[in-house]
Amino acid sequence: MAKTSSVEKNNRRRKMAKQYAGKRARLKAIAQNKSATMEERFEAQLKLAQLPRNSAPTRIRNRCELTGRPRAYYRKIKMSRLALRDLANQGLIPGMVKSSW
């Protein structure tokens, strides 16, 4: 089980990224617009840099829904390999059996 503080910090980042998504997208569009003047583009970049660091979507870490583990994460099922294995061994995932040969 991951530290509760790490999971909560990641949840705050998700919430903040969602909150600032529109503003961040508008500023990025201005900053990357080649037809805008250099001053407008520079001003948009400065405003973008003044936004909270944790509002960037790249700061969000994918974590397991059950354990909060940040590594060995399967995006399709939003779970780590260890949690998936435990559920499969308990027979809670239909069609998944332990391999043997």
Image (spheres, rainbow, N blue to C red):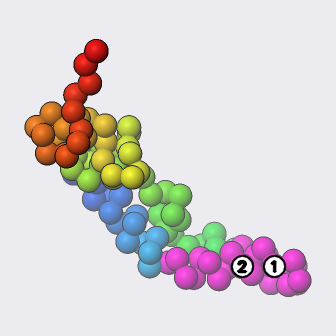
| Residue shown at 40% from the left, 64% from the top | 13
Query: Residue 95 is drawn in which quadrant?
Result: top left
Q: Dot 2, how many residues are within 10 Å of its Cα: few (below 14), some (14-19), or many (20+)? A: few
| Residue shown at 85% from the left, 84% from the top | 36
Q: In the picture, which quadrant includes the N terminus?
A: top left
Vertical comparison of 58 with 38: above or below: above
Please indicate whether residue 42 sits to the left or right of residue 90 in the image.
Answer: right
User: Answer yes or no: do the residues labelled 2 and 1 have beta carbons within 8 Å?
Assistant: yes
> Which stretch is magenta?
20-45
Residue type beneath disc 1: Asn
Please indicate whether residue 31 sits to the left or right of residue 58 in the image.
Answer: right
Vertical comparison of 22 with 70: above or below: below
Q: Mark 1 points at which residue?
A: 33
Query: Residue 27 is drawn in which quadrant?
Result: bottom right
Q: Position of residue 68 (x, y in %)?
A: 27, 48
Q: Dot 1, how many residues are within 10 Å of its Cα: few (below 14), some (14-19), or many (20+)? A: few
Q: Is residue 28 magenta?
A: yes
Q: Is mark 1 on a helix, strand or loop?
A: loop
Between the residue at mark 2 and the residue at mark 1, the CA separation in whole angstroms equals 6 Å
Query: Residue 15 is drawn in which quadrant?
Result: bottom left
- Please give the count of numbered marks on the rendered protein: 2
Q: Position of residue 74 (x, y in %)?
A: 38, 45
Specify the label residue 29 is tagged with. 2
Please name the predominant secondary structure of the magenta segment in the image. Answer: helix
Residue type beneath disc 2: Ala
